[in-house]
Image: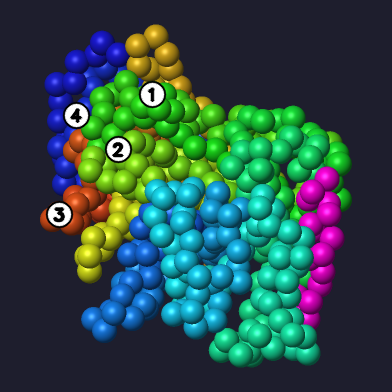
Amino acid sequence: MGARCGVWLLLTALLIPVCVTAQVPVRIVIHGDQGETTINRHIYGHFSEHLGRMIYDGVWVRNEEGEWQLRDDVIEALRQLQIPNLRWPGGCFADYYFWRDGIGPRDQRPSMVNTVWGGVTEDNSFGTHEFMELVQRIGTEPIVVGNVGSGTVRDMADWWEYLNHPGGSSLADLRAANGHPDPYDVRFFGVGNENWGCGGNMTASEYAREYRRYQTFLRPMGDVRPFRIASGPNAAMFEWTETLMGDAGRFIDGLDLHYYTYTGTWQNKGRATEFNEAEWFEAMQRALRIDEIIRGHSEIMDRFDPRKRVWLIVGEWGMWHDVEPGTNPGFLYQQNALRDAVVAGLHLNVFNNHADRVRMANLAQTVNVLQSVILTQGDQMILTPTYHVFHMYKVHMDATLLPLELDAGLYSHGDEAIPAITASASRNQQGTVHITLTNLDPTRPRTVQSQLRGINARSVSGRILTAETMTAHNTFEQPNNVAPTDFGGARLSGSDLIVELPPKSVVVLELR
């Protein structure tokens, strides 16, 4: 790391230092003739919990008359992302939530104290019907998480019936009386959340027994067959996956893995917008662990499920920082910098490359909580750097994964080193190839030499997300500090693609 950077290049309207010391080029071989696996669009999913200002102020606001309504600007921004699913009502909140409190006339709904997040009063004005209207307006698919920790089998079975029975039952009649005669046709249903922790502090064997019992009563209803999502492991809790797949695997359709990236200690994670390169490096190093964690759980699942019927779902992921000063610690409100965007691109590349087993994922969370894609303040709204990564990467949804071989080079800091580059590639139904790249090194560019096999490309274009500083972020005063621009640093040379990848950047390329 001792090289001196004395040369400056003008790239995408940013002055970026380029080290005089020669870099060993990053090499990629992309096998355009070997694609078989579809990148499931549900990998690009999102998460909405009754936590802080995610629901209230985030998507559910009072109008001038004091009446609750959905927030149009946030809905339109999420429509632009083409988000494939939205998970609700939690999270830890799900195992405290009783769905009957959130139906019927809003002024008659009982309130509760949200003891999980911030100790604030929850008035239940946002419930089942409001959530279903939200997903309908976004144009996405709902994921509903049931209460195992403090609920009963009957509670969950009744909610399932309320959501999906086509008619002729008292619960379907109740749904009609509350304004929706037609069934909601919800298929994705989570049987509890983090039941190893906030969802009941169960052992793997205890939860496997409870899961088998609860899922029994999620029966096909009308045209809907349940897609049963089991509460999966925390990070590298491999014994949870081993026990659950062994004891209940044949009843599971999706296994919900959670993994968060943070720096420092759990008690002192540091600020989202105030950090040095050591903390940048630590974030990238910990984020890269998601690959080995997925590999470990996939190997276990493969033993019990060699045909890969069960989806591995990364149901909560993202960067977790200390809250912004002056905000409720239980609201988990944090800013979102370029560092978060690079971590997001890294994760999505990993998920794409494991598309044979990873079929769904949910960024935590959508608005105003943790690594959100949107921040709101009163009637203002800004898009975070992470939002832009999702917008750039949506080209991979439902495309065919193209296998690649990557010699990623090294990003060194102090006595440690990690891969410098992550990448994934796909071909859509129109035959267009997209390649996404992240440069994890915040100070040095990389030359990426790609050999294109089975790809007859005549043109290349691209978009880039980067900034002058590691801590760059968008504010309500300056909402476009970090935003994508056109990228001209890629060129074709016969069957090769050469990319000059700036430091701390996320790039999407389109080959035609």
Where does the image place residue 491, in percent across and percent down from the top left? 36, 46
Q: Earlier in the sequence, mark 2 or mark 4?
A: 4
Res 43 quadrant in image: bottom right
> How far is mark 2 from mark 4, CA to CA?
24 Å
Question: In the image, what residue type sits under mark 4?
Answer: Pro
Q: Amino acid at mark 3?
A: Gln
Viewer-nearest of discs 2 and 4 = 2
Which residue is located at x 79 percent, y 58 percent? 215
Q: Tell me the number on the disc at residue 264.
A: 1
Front disc: 3 or 2? 2
Q: Position of residue 125 (x, y in %)?
A: 45, 73
Q: How is the image coloured?
A: rainbow
Q: Which residue is mark 4?
A: 17
Q: Nearer the viewer, residue 508 or 218?
A: 218
Q: Position of residue 448 (x, y in %)?
A: 41, 34
Q: Which residue is mark 3?
A: 478
Identify the residue at image location x=49%, y=48%. 116
Q: Nearer the viewer, mark 4 or mark 1?
A: 1
User: In the image, is residue 472 above or below residue 406?
Assistant: below
